[in-house]
Image: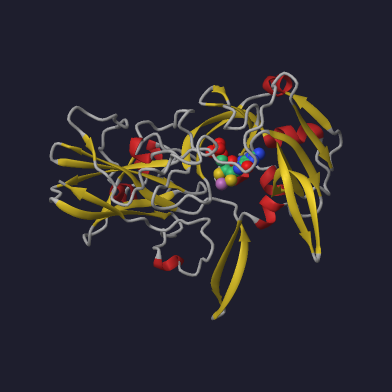
Amino acid sequence: MDVQHSRRDILRGGLAAASLGVIGVPDWVLPALAQGATVVPFLEFPETFNANPAPDRRLFDTRTLTSFTTPKDQFFTTQHYGHPVLDAATFQLKVSGLVNTPKAFSMAELQKMPKSEVMFGFECSGNRAPVQGLCSNGKWTGVSLAALLKSVGVKDSGREFVFLGADHGTEEVEWRTQKYSLDQQFGRSMPRDKALSPEPIVAYAYNDEPLTRHQGFPLRLIVPGWYGVANVKWLSDIIVQQDPYLGKYQARWYRTVKGEMVNGEMKWMESAVTHLQLKSFVARVTKEGATHKVTGIAMNDGTAFKSVEVKIDDGPWQPATWDKQNSKYSWKLFHYDWKGATAGEHTIVSRVTDVNGLVQPTEKELENKKSFLEHNAQHPRRVMIS
Ligand SMILES: Nc1nc2c(c(=O)[nH]1)N[C@H]1C(S)=C(S)[C@@H](COP(=O)(O)O)O[C@H]1N2
Ligand SMILES: [Mo]
């Protein structure tokens, strides 16, 4: 059952939907703080988390979450070479390599092409406890990447699609015993199937306004269901080639190092950071009268969810309620009313399960993951109830 696509799908889903507690639940809009309501502090939350090294990096304070889409000036931001300032009037997106007609597109040309849009929430692959602030959600509008590529004619031999940002820096590139100091642009790649799939968008707008400079003005790649790093900002070049691209931020920086049991043997594998791993966490707790309202965020690659549950201390897993605005590639908000909370310290944790039966892992189950990227462990929050 596909619980996240529409209310009708949810109602058709019968039993599983009932277990989510979605039937008969009023459509709720995320509330700002109600009169007399207070935000319950998270005990491990470092209050100085956003002070440094702002403004180059901004984390979203999930405790202030009051809207489904993140306002543009609160959208998290992080990047490797600062923010280039580009002039939309002279900007060009150059498409070259294994295409029939290499072409440079102006912003005016792109804006005349048919529009595509997607509600997409993503996190940086480095997002993790205790802050979980490297994630946001909103509506992206632009041109379908597949349509753009079809308009220049991709050759059959084109298998690797490289996306370069206008941002660049000097990198020490090592090859065997040699070291070269080279000026390189930020670059990422995708295989042919992904690049020509219907979802990716070359986006020029966020929540119906031009992208901010932080978000990649005037143009960025949006790859619904993939980690932040795939969404190349200040997108200036698309190069179609045959062989895998092995730039620093593709092959070296964004890797996961983990041990996996294969045929009864531990294999230490290194893999690329691509699609979002199944994850949820408690984002915000407010006290409203006798009830503690828990709001959480869940994310994955677009695979439908089966359930999201919340657990207090050593109690049972309890079903949470989905926000009706959730859509396939958005972040998914969920809600849980915690009644009868007693004074003192408590632990509150969430977990999601997808329709394939994949369950969000515990910290313990991730112990063989050495590197911190793609950290989708269940995240117990400690709160003090007064
Ligand atoms: N050109 C360019 N694009 C980039 C990056 C970058 O350094 N340069 N960083 C990536 C990473 S690691 C993330 S998490 C997202 C962050 O996007 P945001 O700043 O809009 O949140 O941008 C991605 N796109
Ligand atoms: Mo990232």
Quadrant hosting residue 60: top left
**Image spot of residue 129 (x, y percent):** 40, 53
Residue 372, given in percent of the width and then of the height, sits at 51, 59
Q: Residue sitting at 67 percent across and 50 percent down?
A: 249
The residue that appears at 31% across and 30% down in the rendered structure is 29
Q: Quadrant of residue 63?
A: top left
151 vs 250, nearest the viewer: 250
Tell me which residue sits at (54%, 81%) in the image: 264
- Does any portion of residue 175 appear in the rendered image? yes
Left or right of 290, for residue 169: right
- Farthest-out residue, bottom: 264
Q: Is residue 70 left or right of residue 199?
A: left
Whole-percent x, y for residue 298 in the image? 41, 47
Q: Is residue 272 left or right of residue 339?
A: right
Asked if residue 223 shows in the view, the reply is no
Q: Position of residue 53 (x, y in %)?
A: 51, 41
> In the image, what residue occupies the spot 67% across and 21% down?
111
Marker count (numbered): 0
Q: Is residue 112 above or below residue 172?
A: above
